Amino acid sequence: MEQHLPLDVGLLTSKFAIDASSPTGLRWKVDHWKMKAGDIAGCVKDTGHCIVNFYGKRFHVHRIVWAIYNQRDPAEKTVDHIDRNPSNNSPENLRLATYEGQLRNTKPRSSLYGRGVKKVGNRYYARININGKDFSLGGFATAEEAREKASESRASYIQEHGSKIYPIL
């Protein structure tokens, strides 16, 4: 898990402006090194995440946007993109989350037999992962049975413990 640098909201507010027309979602308010007031702050990386260098440190733009908009430092929480688009840094698309909560919101990895199903020998084994822990659901004769059991167990957990998309903190 990545360590986050503390954010001074007052300093950030004096240096940056949230701007939806900027590719990163942020613009400089004042001249900073080679940058002029009104220039786009930061750049978009190959992964789609936007970063900005500020006083010799590299920051994720979505954390700065969230801090300016909410007027507080997200501290050790992560800032999550609700729509899973790392380039969409509009304040309405950002929310605080725990690292574990963000893991639950990741896209499922594909499987030949379905999510949470693995073939071993002539049996199909189902499992689900909850909060980083794997739970085996047993072996089944067909992939369909194993897939159905995994789906039922996932749905049961969601019903008991909350939404599939974790709650906003």
Image (cartoon, rainbow, N blue to C red):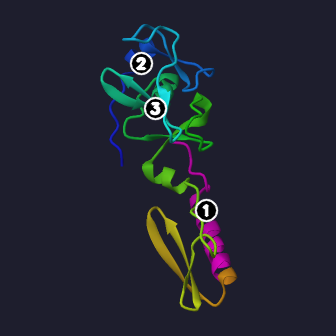
**Cα–Cα gap, marks 2 and 1:** 38 Å
Residue 63 is tagged as 3
Please state which amino acid type lies under the numbered disc 1: Ile
Q: Position of residue 164 (x, y in %)?
A: 61, 56
Taking the magenta stretch, the answer to whether it contains residue 147 is yes
Please rate how many residues cluster around mark 1, counting C-alpha atoms within 10 Å: few if below 14, some from 14 to 19, many from 20. Answer: some
Question: What is the magenta segment's predominant secondary structure?
Answer: helix
Please state which amino acid type lies under the numbered disc 3: Arg
Q: Cβ–Cβ below 8 Å for labels 2 and 1?
A: no
Q: Quadrant of residue 112?
A: bottom right
Please rate how many residues cluster around mark 3, counting C-alpha atoms within 10 Å: few if below 14, some from 14 to 19, many from 20. Answer: many
Q: Which residues are magenta?
A: 146-169
Q: Quadrant of residue 93?
A: top right
Q: Nearer the viewer, mark 1 or mark 3?
A: 3
- Of labels 2 and 1, earlier in sequence is 2
Q: Nearer the viewer, mark 2 or mark 1?
A: 2
Residue 12 is tagged as 2
Disc 3 on helix, strand or loop?
helix
Q: Position of residue 33 (x, y in %)?
A: 36, 11
- Of labels 2 and 3, earlier in sequence is 2
**Cα–Cα gap, marks 2 and 3:** 11 Å
Q: Is residue 155 above or below residue 169?
A: below
* Residue name at image x 56 percent, y 47 percent: 167
* Residue name at image x 36 percent, y 49 percent: 1
Q: Is residue 133 above or below residue 74?
A: below
Disc 2 on helix, strand or loop?
helix
* Residue name at image x 50 percent, y 65 percent: 130
Please state which amino acid type lies under the numbered disc 2: Leu
User: Which residue is under mark 1?
Assistant: 158
